[in-house]
Amino acid sequence: MATYPMNTLRTDLTWTPVYATGISEIDKDHQYLFDLIANIISKTQGHKAHRLNYWEPKLSAYAAEHFIREERLMEQYLTDWPQRAGHIQEHRRYWARVANLKWTYSESDFNEFLQKWWTGHVLGWDKAMGVALQQKFTE
């Protein structure tokens, strides 16, 4: 599965039903993550990097929990789903990019990455996972 090109994504972080996966646990996570990222962006725009250093660990901790939830669902219900390995790989790429941005970022680069990665990931990989899970649950 290809991810959405980063330059074609909506960049607002207001959760709307368009982002719904149909899996309530995952949708609640996404709502919280979108709110957290919007808060980070509003608190860090135009401020020194130390503001981002304050917020980023909270985001990383919750994102890690979220990825674990998704990966457990895939491990439990979607072992034969052809997109499973690619989805998990996208989580690993996220961490690699975040690590790189911590050393080279400006707040605007980091904020833009967060907006685009999360909207693209949810609209692509996570919605596809939601469809696969819903099919599995109705079998």
Image (cartoon, rainbow, N blue to C red):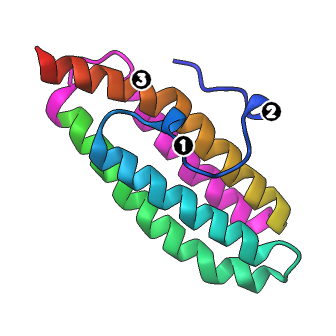
> Picture coordinates of residue 60 (x, y %)?
50, 66
> Picture coordinates of residue 82 (x, y %)?
34, 15
Residue farthest toward the right in the current orientation of the protein: 46
Type of amino acid under label 2:
Asn
Disc 2 secondary structure class: helix
Q: Which mark is residue 135?
A: none
Q: Earlier in the sequence, mark 2 or mark 3?
A: 2
Instruction: Categorize mark 3 by other alpha carbons within 10 Å: few (<14), some (14-19), many (20+).
Output: some
Q: Is 35 left or right of 111, judged from the image as shown?
A: left
- 83 shown above or below 45: above
> Quarter-wise, where is residue 139 in the image?
top left
Residue at the (59%, 45%) spot, across then down: 118
Q: Which mark is residue 128?
A: 3
Instruction: Categorize mark 2 by other alpha carbons within 10 Å: few (<14), some (14-19), many (20+).
Output: few
Type of amino acid under label 1:
Thr
Residue on which disc 1 sits: 16
Any part of residue 30 in sight: yes
Residue farthest toward the left in the current orientation of the protein: 139
Residue at the (89%, 75%) spot, across then down: 46
> Picture coordinates of residue 74 (x, y %)?
25, 33
**Boundaries of the magenta span:** 76-105
Residue on which disc 2 sits: 7
Disc 3 secondary structure class: helix
Q: CA distance from mark 1 to mark 2?
A: 20 Å
Q: Earlier in the sequence, mark 3 or mark 1?
A: 1
- 103 shown above or below 135: below
Residue at the (14%, 18%) spot, across then down: 138
Q: CA distance from mark 3 to mark 1?
A: 17 Å
Any part of residue 86 in sight: no
